[in-house]
Amino acid sequence: MTSTDTAHNPNQRLVHQVSDGCACAICGATARPLALHLLERSYSKDATPAKGFLVMAMSVEAVRGIFPVCDLCAPACPTCGLPVATEQVLKFKKSVGAKNGNGVCPQHGDQNLGKRIGAIFKRTLKAWRSKKS
């Protein structure tokens, strides 16, 4: 992928990509495209990372990295192409203490669920109040 490709489509680096030598942290698949920015985690330098952790950066105190996830465990969104955080991914995320990275579909990400429900509730309440008046 060239820098021109990234400039025209910034999400391109966040979609599933074939990566040699990497395996899915959830199912262990090696021949599938992987989402590399779906789950992120930091560990202290002395801690032992969870299985499947891929180191991306190191500092004096910590190790930062990702958990690669294949397109079977986290399929691509048909609208934007970014990986969807499925129930299987959310369960794994909780078990390793990871957080969502930048490569999660904003329409299907678990962090947006509360905001979406809140917005629906506010609209419903506003419509109910306007009918009452």
Image: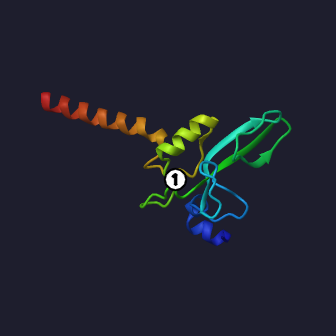
Residue 12: x and y in percent read 58, 64
Q: Identify the residue under disc 1.
A: 74
Q: Examine the rendered structure and indicate whether residue 17 appears above or below residue 66.
A: below
Q: Position of residue 97 (x, y in %)?
A: 63, 35
Image position of 86 (left or right of 42): left
- Along the horizontal axis of the image, is 83 left or right of 43? left
> Would you say residue 133 is visible in this rendering?
no
In the figure, is residue 73 to the left or right of 98?
left
The residue at the point 64 percent across, 37 percent down is 96
Residue type, mark 1 in image: Ala
In the rendered structure, the answer to whether residue 42 lies left or right of residue 78 reads right
Q: Residues within 10 Å of mark 1 (few under 14, many from 20)?
A: many
On the image, the x and y values in percent for residue 33 come to 59, 63
Identify the element where label 1 is drawn: loop
Q: Depth check: 94 or 26 in front?
A: 26
Q: Quadrant of the N terminus?
A: bottom right
